[in-house]
Image: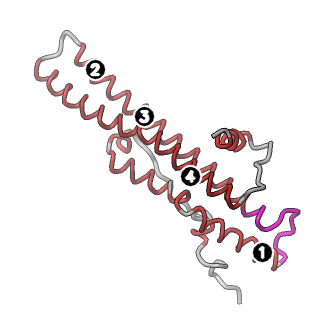
Amino acid sequence: MVSTKPPLGSLAIQAPSLTPQIVHVSPETCLDLSIFKAVLRSYRALDDTINMRLNRTTAFVNDQERQKATRGKQSAEEQACARLWQELVSNWTRRRELIEYCVGVVDQHSKAKQEILDSQTSSPREIRKARAEKYSQEVKRDQIHKELAVEAIVKQRSVDAFRSRCMYFVPPLTDVEARKMWDAASAR
């Protein structure tokens, strides 16, 4: 009888869900700060649990080695580090894309309101409404731009934690995006 339960606890702890929820980001996602921040918070969960994931991934790889499921040249620790690094890079890329997309959306909305304010044909009512909406857009814009700074802090904290456990890990030269992120983190 084959067990349907994953080894060593939840696979969600070891890696992203096997059936990940696809988040379709629309301009409305960007314009509603609570939804935008909720999406970012779910993406940052990996960074928040990096040490636990390293422990779980190492245990998972050790278990596979004991069962002779994987016969690699790398140690369990090296395999765990490589697997987690790939997850981190993928996650950071998705977050960066989300933030950059939302920055563009909010900037575009702000620009549209400015055009109404600059227009000679706008009525006083339209101008008042556009001014209020532009102010609201500027607040959202500032919040989303601040997420870029928060992202840098979260990423650096994760890299520091990763390096403390994976001291000898270096991403493969073939993974250009991962190498860029590694080199940028190393420069700090």
Residue 130, percent across and down? 20, 26
Tag in front: 3 or 4: 4
Element type where label 4 sits in the image: helix
Which residue: 58% across, 51% down? 91
- Residue type at mark 2? Gln
Proximity of marks 2 and 3: CB atoms separated by less than 8 Å: no
Reading the chain from its start, which is encountered first: label 1 or label 2? Answer: 1
Proximity of marks 2 and 4: CB atoms separated by less than 8 Å: no
Drawn side of residue 131 relative to residue 67, left or right: left
> Which residues, given as a range, are shown in magenta?
68-80
Q: Could you tell me how far apart the alpha carbons at marks 1 and 3 are, in whole angstroms?
A: 43 Å
Q: Could you tell me how far apart the alpha carbons at marks 2 and 3 are, in whole angstroms?
A: 16 Å
Residue carrying label 3? 103
Quarter of the figure with residue 83: bottom right
Query: How has the structure been colored for display?
Result: secondary structure
Say the numbered circle drawn on residue 64.
1
Residue 102, percent across and down? 42, 37
Which residue: 39% across, 54% down? 38
